[in-house]
Structures are given as C-alpha cells and as structure tokens.
Image (cartoon, helix red, strand yellow):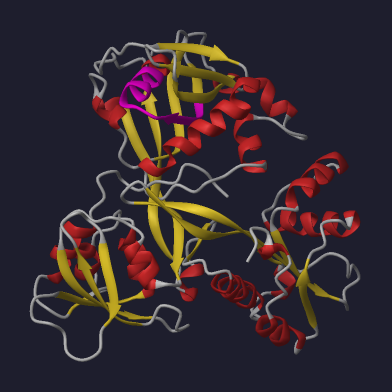
C-alpha cells in the first residue's frame, strides 16, 4: 500500500450503510471542491463553537487539508443540505513510545456532530469507521485529543498521557538551577520554519506520548499562515544553541499586555518550549523567569512532571493546576503494540484483554527480555506458573501502555483484576517509563 493510499481508501461500508438506513449520507470529502470544503470546515467550526473563517483562511486550509482523510455525514432533507451534520478527519502519524521508539498511529480530529442529530448513533458510526480504516491500513493504534472526557471510552479509547497548566510567580523566585554554557538569542519565526520543525521531530522520541506533526499544526504553533497574522504580531521566539553553536531548543511566548496591572507585573504566556538537552531546558526557563518587568509566567499544556519546579528557590511559587488527561489512545493490534516499545525490567506476563469491539480481545503471553525487548504470543490453555497475570479491558491496557498510569492504581480502583497475587505491582515495574508521558500539542 502506498504512503497516500489512505486518501483514496473507500468510505467504510458498514458505517455508511447503517447511517443510510436513517436517510443520512456518509462519504469522503473532495477537498478539490472548494464550496464543499467551505461547508465542511464551517460545520467543524460550528461544532467547536468557533467563529466563521474568512474566505482566505478557508482556501488556505483547503490546500493543506488534502493530506488528511476528511469525512462527513449529510442530511439531504435539511434547508442547508450542503453543510454536513457530522465531520471527522484522520491521517497517518507517529506515536513515540518508551525506548526512544515510534509506532505508526492513526490520528483522529475534527470530530463533530450537530446538536440536531445527536443520539442517533452518528458519532459511533464515525468513530468505528475510523477504527476500521486504521485497521485496514495496518496501523496498530488510533490516537486523539478530546474536548470532552466522557465520550470516547465506549469505543475503547483511554487516557494515556496527562498534561497540566503551570503558573510561576517570578517576583518570588530566584533561579537555582544550573548555569549552562551556550547561548539564548531572540530569533524570528522564519528561522524556526525548518530549523524548529527539525528540532521538534529530533527530540520527539525522548518523550512517550508525543505525536509527529507538521502542516497547519506547525504553522499555528509559530504563528505562520493565513489567518494567523494578528497572533504572529504578539509572538516572540527564543532559541538556545550549545557551546558548539548547535541549536538544542527554542521557546515561543507572548506578553499579555491586557493583564498588566503595573509596569513591573506583566504576564508571559508560554506557548511552546522544546529542548533536546537538559542544558537547553534550563537555559530557556532561566531566560523566561528572569525577564524584566514580568511578574508571572503561565505555561499551559505542559508535562505533569516539570524539572523547573526544582530549579527555583521557592517551589511554592511554582503551581501546577488543571491536571488532566490529554492524549487518548485506542489499541487495535496488541502484539504489535507490546513488541513495539521497550520495558524497564524483564518478566513473564499474561494479559487477558477484553474488548467489546473485538479488535484487541485475547489472552496474550508477554515475555520481556533483559534488554527490554519483548516477545508476544497468544496463550492457549492455563496460565504458566511463573507469570504475573491480570485481566483488563482494552481501555486499561491503553492507559498503562506508555507507562504514565499505574497498574496498581487501576487495580485498587477495581479497573484491573489480578489473576495472580501481586501481578499489578510487577506490571508497574516493567511498564515504567523513565520520562513521564506527555503530548505537547492539540491535534
């Protein structure tokens, strides 16, 4: 199958047939049809309570949307039959997993259903179609970020990486972290168009849960592209290069003038900070904390485990809040997922996985070698005596997979069943990830 075969794969017959019984038409969107795309994008904006996009923005989005598989559901009986009542977009991506490795993933976004067509199984038809599409493409996992946390578990998705917002009262803190060689400089967005994108992809594998991204997602981050002109005016960019002049990190921030109460109490909002080395991380955070005329830094969508907390003299001035789930994954191919990452300690395990949709159901024997690699086979017969065995749904397997959610916690919560005593604690040690899983973007 070619790299762009997903664009021409036929619409999912099962979902389309089910919706047709209700008089609804499900089909792929032809992004070459400018009018159809404008209506589709308008439905997406309506679903997320966004304002109407200008014709220039619609056209710019149409050009980039050609690399995504965009689908919709239409009701021909409406006064506006050209605007879909439901939307979804999907595309192949890469998910970083423990061991500095990456697995192919199907990214899903733009999921909307009009309030006029709720509780008719439309969302289920869309999501199940995306699952079958990913399976047809041979991808072992589907990933998404969600605006509502109560919707997707019914289809086997589960939170696998958390995020939090951080606030630092810089008027109260002094930097106590390392003083590093290298240099922080202001740069323009033009320098980051290629250099920044390459750096983000270079360091992605170091953190489980990161997704590869480019196109409109990258443009949005650095304020490039049609419709982002006003945002771009307020963004500032800094880059850290090591003592050899090699770029190792950058940050994007803006000063929130409207929140300024006195000249000395401006607020900085950190849009993005990425670092390839600990030196780069320290240098960029020190620069931000020591900015003149600034009293507060707000850093949304950061890791729940930030070293900067330990790099100032008053940790109480560094506040983590709104900790929440961010990346949700849905495992389709258990053997491919289990063999696709590395593990912390060796061991023998039995994972009895249930899945109402039957993609991941089965009893799997997982053997982890001393080097962290794994061998997986389906188990027939009794559980071997030297294994740690648990029973869990595909949801719980998704949560513990990246190492960010404790099997012991899920056991105590009644979400995992131990088939052999102490199995959850053994799973914790083996599935542990040295770096806390985190996804740094919305998609």
Is 280 magenta? The answer is yes
**Residue 43's x, y, as percent?**
77, 59
190 lies above or below 94: above
**Residue 250's x, y, as percent?**
48, 24
Residue 340 in view (yes/no): yes
- Closer to the camera in the image, 73 or 297: 73
**Position of 14 compared to 317: left or right?**
right
Q: Which residue is drawn at 24% across and 22% down?
A: 314
Point out the stretch of residues depicted in magenta. 269-285
**Position of 313 compared to 150: left or right?**
left
Q: Which residue is drawn at 69% across and 56% down?
A: 68
Quarter assignment of residue 329: bottom left
Is 384 magenta? The answer is no
Q: Residue at x 45, y 54 (%)?
A: 327
307 lies above or below 39: above
- Closer to the camera in the image, 140 or 393: 140
**Position of 319 compared to 25: left or right?**
left
Q: Which residue lies furthest to the front in this view?
A: 1
**Position of 58 compared to 404: left or right?**
right
119 lies above or below 441: below
**Residue 370's x, y, as percent?**
15, 57
Residue 52 in view (yes/no): no
- Closer to the camera in the image, 171 or 144: 144
């Amino acid at each position: 199958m070619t790299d762009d075969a997903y664009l021409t794969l036929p619409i999912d017959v099962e979902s389309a047939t089910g919706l047709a019984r209700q008089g609804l038409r499900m089909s792929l969107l032809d992004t070459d049809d400018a009018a159809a795309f404008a209506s589709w994008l308008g439905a997406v904006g309506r679903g997320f309570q966004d304002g109407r996009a200008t014709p220039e923005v619609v056209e710019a989005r149409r050009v980039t949307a050609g690399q995504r598989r965009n689908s919709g559901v239409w009701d021909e009986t409406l006064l506006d039959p050209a605007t879909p009542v439901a939307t979804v977009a999907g595309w192949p991506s890469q998910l970083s997993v423990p061991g500095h490795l990456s697995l192919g993933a199907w990214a899903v976004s733009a999921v909307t259903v009009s309030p006029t067509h709720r509780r008719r199984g439309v969302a289920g038809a869309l999501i199940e179609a995306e699952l079958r599409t990913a399976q047809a493409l041979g991808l072992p996992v589907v990933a998404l970020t969600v605006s509502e946390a109560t919707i997707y578990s019914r289809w086997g998705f589960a939170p696998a990486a958390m995020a939090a917002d951080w606030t630092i009262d810089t008027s109260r803190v002094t930097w106590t972290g390392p003083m590093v060689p290298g240099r922080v400089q202001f740069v323009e967005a033009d320098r980051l168009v290629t250099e920044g994108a390459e750096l983000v992809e270079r360091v992605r594998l170091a953190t489980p849960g990161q997704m590869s991204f480019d196109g409109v997602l990258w443009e949005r981050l650095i304020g490039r592209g049609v419709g982002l002109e006003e945002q771009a005016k307020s963004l500032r960019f800094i880059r850290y290069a090591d003592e050899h002049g090699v770029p190792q990190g950058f940050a994007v921030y803006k000063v929130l003038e409207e929140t300024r109460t006195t000249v000395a109490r401006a607020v900085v909002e950190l849009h993005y900070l990425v670092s390839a080395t600990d030196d780069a991380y320290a240098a960029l955070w020190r620069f931000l904390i020591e900015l003149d005329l600034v009293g507060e830094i707000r850093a949304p969508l950061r890791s729940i485990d930030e070293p900067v907390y330990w790099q100032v003299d008053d940790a109480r001035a560094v506040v983590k809040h709104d900790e929440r789930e961010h990346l949700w994954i849905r495992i389709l191919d258990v053997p491919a997922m289990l063999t696709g990452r590395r593990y912390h300690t060796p061991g023998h395990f039995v994972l009895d996985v249930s899945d109402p949709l039957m993609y991941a159901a089965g009893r799997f024997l997982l053997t982890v070698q001393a080097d962290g690699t794994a061998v997986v086979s389906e188990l027939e017969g009794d559980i071997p005596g030297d294994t740690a065995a648990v029973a869990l749904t595909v949801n719980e397997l998704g949560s513990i997979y990246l190492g960010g959610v404790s099997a012991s916690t899920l056991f105590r919560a009644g979400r995992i069943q131990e088939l052999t005593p102490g199995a959850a604690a053994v799973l914790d040690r083996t599935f542990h990830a040295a770096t806390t899983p985190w996804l740094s973007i919305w998609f």
